[in-house]
Structures are given as C-alpha cells and as structure tokens.
Image (cartoon, rainbow, N blue to C red):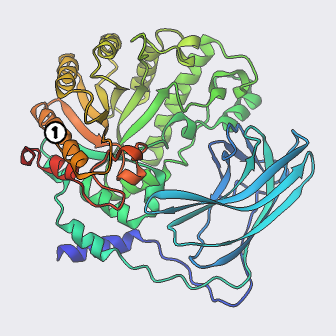
Amino acid sequence: MNKKLISLMLVLCLIPMGTAFSAGEDKAVYTSDFSKDEDGWYGRGAQSFRTAEGTLKTVGRESDWNSPGRDFPLVEGGKYHLSVEVKQDEIAMANFMISVAHTSDGVETYENLAHGSAKKGEWTAISGTYTAGAFDRYVLYVETTGAGTLSYEIRNFTVTAPEGEPEPKPTEPPMIVEEAKEELPSLKDIYADKFDFGTAVPQTAFSSAKLQVLILKQFNILTPENELKPDSVLDVQGSKKLVEETGDETQVAVHLDAAGPLLDFAQKYHLKVHGHVLVWHSQTPGAFFHEGYDAKNPQVSRDVMLARLENYIKAVFEATEAQYPGVIVSWDVLNEAIDDGTNKLRNSNWKKIIGEDYPNYAFAYARKYAPESVRLYYNDYNTAIPGKLAGIVTLLKSLIGDGNIDGYGFQMHHSVGFPSMSQIKAAVERIEQLGLRLRVSELDVGVSGNTEAAFKKQAEFYANLMKLLIKHSDSFEAVQVWGLNDQMSWRSKDYPLLFDGKGNPKPAFWAVADPDSVT
C-alpha cells in the first residue's frame, strides 16, 4: 500500500468523529448529575469528589486554578450559555469564575468566561456565555480568585446552545504536514539496533492528530510529563476515606485518570512506556505525610510512612498491570534524591520521617511488587557535575548492594555552553562502571536565542552527544527527549528541542538523525 495512503488512513483513525446538531434550536448540551458519581469531573491540581448530598466538592487546593474540571465536546463556532451554583463555608465572601482551558496542537490556553461572588454558606448562581474557538479540546472548570486554598462545592453545572449547535466543520487531515514529514527519517528506526528513542508527552498532546502522527513516526517509548507523578496518582480523598472507615493509617488509594490518554494510546499502538515517578520530594501531596491524610494534622510515624510507601507502590503496580498489562516496561522508582549543595540525601519529608534508608525501602518495595520484566531506575540531574556525581554514585552503590536496582537515568537538561562534553563523558563512564543499565531520561539542549547561529551550535551539541551515546550504546536502553516541540517545552524560552513550535524539524533533528553530518 502507498505510504502516503497509510499516513492518511492513520490520521483519519486518530481524529475523533463529532456529532452533528442542527442549528436554529435551543439545545440542552449538558447538565451535571452527581447523584451516582463524579459525572466525568476531576480535580485539576486538587481533589474533587461527590458528596452524599449530590454535589461535587473540591478540597486540597494550593492555588486559584486548582479546580473541578470536565472535558466538553464543544463545536467550533458554537455559542454556549454556561451556568453553575457554587457554595463555600470558610470565608465571608469568595470570588469565583467559570473558565475554559482550550488546546490546539498540544498547546493549552485559557479564557475566563463568567464571574460571581458567593457569601459564606449560601448557594450562588454564576452564568456567562462562550463562543467556541478553533481548538482540539475544551475543559470547562470553576476556579477562584484570591482564595487559592478555599474548599467549595458545585452543583447544577449546565451548558446550553441557545441558537443550536452548528454542524462540526469537516476535519481536514493534515495532508500537507504529513507529506512533508513523510520524507523525514524516523529516529526510532535509525537507532533501532542501539536503543529505544522516545519522548515525554503531556496529556494535552492526545487531542491533536498531528502530534499523534508525529509520535508514531518518530518514537517507540513514551514518558508522561506529569501524569504518573504522585500528585496525579495518589487519591488523597479516597485514602482519607479508607482511613476513616478502617481506622488503619497505612491505607492508600490510587487512580490512573490523568495518565489514561497516554497509556491508552501506547496500548493501542504497541508503544513502550517508561513510568515517572514513584517517589519524589516534589509533586507529592503534602497530605501523604500526615495523619488522616490531613495536612493540618501531625506527620505520621516512620512505621506508618513505610507502610504507606509500600502500599502506594503496591497499588500503583497493581493498577497499571491490571489496566495496562505489559505497557510500562520500566519505572523511575526514585527521583532527584541527592541535594545539589551537600551532595547528600535531600532533606525531604521522606528523609525526615523515614530516615536515610528510605531509598533502600523504596526500591525493595518496587522490586517486591513490580512484574519481573520491569526494570527499576534511579533518576537525577546534574550528573555531569563532579560533586553531584560523587553523591549519586554513593547512593547507587548502596542500592546496588541491596540488589533491587537495575539502572540509572541521566536527566540531561543542558545548554550549549554547559556542561562540557568531557564532563558528560566522564559521568557516563563513571556510572557505566557500576554495571547498571543506563538511559537518557530527559534530554533537551537550550540556546540563547531563536537564530540560525544558535541553532547551529545546538545541532553541534546534539551531534556530539549522540556520538558519545552511540559509543556506549551497549549500556543504554533508551534516549528520550523531554517534549515534542519548542512551544510545548517547559524550557520553551530556550528553544531546546528537535522540532520548532510549528512542528518543523530543526538543525538539531538532523544532527540527531545523522550525527556524522555535523562538522
């Protein structure tokens, strides 16, 4: 079959088919029903759960945007009326907004659609209108202004189309883009006999057919950017409920809601996934370390925290293997445990509560519950800095002695001027001597500006790095860039990736595809 026909068929398979509605009639699009479950709503950086009264309550907030949210299949050009009732019981008056997070080609942007103020203890209605723009995904949510830690409830969230919803515009497959990319070499194919080549992908990318095609063309292993971190996986309210029901402080509840789009995609197209991360000092709910999963209570004891750690790791492996058997081939068990200043264990909650041996326990529990084929990694940054390298090696030797670690992940968030290639080479060779499997887990290379000269230097850095990794390919399992394109990168101002913000290959891409072509 013709290659371009295959590409077109792939794009068409990836693009969801919309439902047609006739214009000219007042149409009820959605009314929330929390009588049985959360009705598709989830906590955006918080915990949202159905109450016995049939409302949705959101708690554990640390910022105004932390909110209950839900995906809606809105139609471009459709005019919508939105309304919701809110209630809070903590302060005299709180300001609320209905907002939308919309996504196009994996880039998320925001609009505030309606405003209102709710007195303490009173249900208050807020309403507004929205004309849907040209986006791939729409998430409607209810947030606060100036009350980032406030807990609140919502009910009767309603969406109507007063003029009727328009017919969805025919989706045009990205033929021109795909034909241009058809001529690009495939990085996963180029390095197939050396190591996997992959990328980190945010949840929003799976609303873009073009990005999905790019993923399938170039990569064979994925890492979720944030969706498997404890903030996304630990179900604080579910855990709290288990403790209340059983009186057992060691109980843990988890869910895979945030990681679902990536894991579904990987399962469907037979891609590997590297899990990131089980234990980290950051992006872990503070309530995890407190009695009753309530940050207002004292921290738990060492024994309770060890049991929670074990139960959390056990629950994650059970959930991923039950829902996505064989998809996740490796895990970062522990991330960034070495402090940059002291080059010793970071003084995190894990260390404060459990002690210096918490890494050993984390790997012991992971080994106990991980499927036999899953490899277990320690992951860290600044490995090329001699002092940090020494601290990392000390920790690795302790873990190797226990027999529960398989490999080390190099976070290579570098810039063209630092570190030097000789420093990177020394770090690779030093850890390679320990007999561990290796991976470049997070790769990007920043430059000072969006110029031809800057991108030439960037390409040279990527080429020299790939030449080094090829020489040591017997030790490396994977190389993964951290993101799909510059616009989506967490370092977007440094233009660090292989594709620019429009998805075009940069000199860096060609340098990775053929390192010897760069002089």
Residue 76 visible from this viewpoint? yes
Report which quarter residue 273 is drawn in: top left
Pick the front one: 428 or 507: 507
Identify which amino acid the numbered label 1 is placed on: Met
Residue at label 1? 466
Vertical arrangement, residue 138 with respect to residue 480, above or below: below
Q: What residue lies at 29% left-to-right and 19% top-to-bottom?
A: 385
Element on which disc 1 rests: helix
Viewed as shown, does residue 300 lie left or right of 102? Answer: right
Which image quadrant is residue 123 in? bottom right
Please tell me which residue lies in front, 392 or 133: 133
Q: Is residue 174 above or below residue 418?
A: below
* Depicted 262 relative to depicted 491: above or below: below
- Compared across the picture, whether 366 is left or right of 393 comes to right
Identify the residue at image location x=41%, y=27%: 333
- Residue 170: image location, x then y, percent: 45, 83
Residue 474, horizontal then vertical, whole percent: 13, 32
Residue 61, image x, y percentages = 70, 39
Label 1 packing within 10 angstroms: few (<14), some (14-19), many (20+): many
From the viewer's perspective, is 184 left or right of 495? left
Q: Residue at x 53, y 64 (%)?
A: 137
Question: Does residue 373 appear in the picture of this structure?
Answer: no
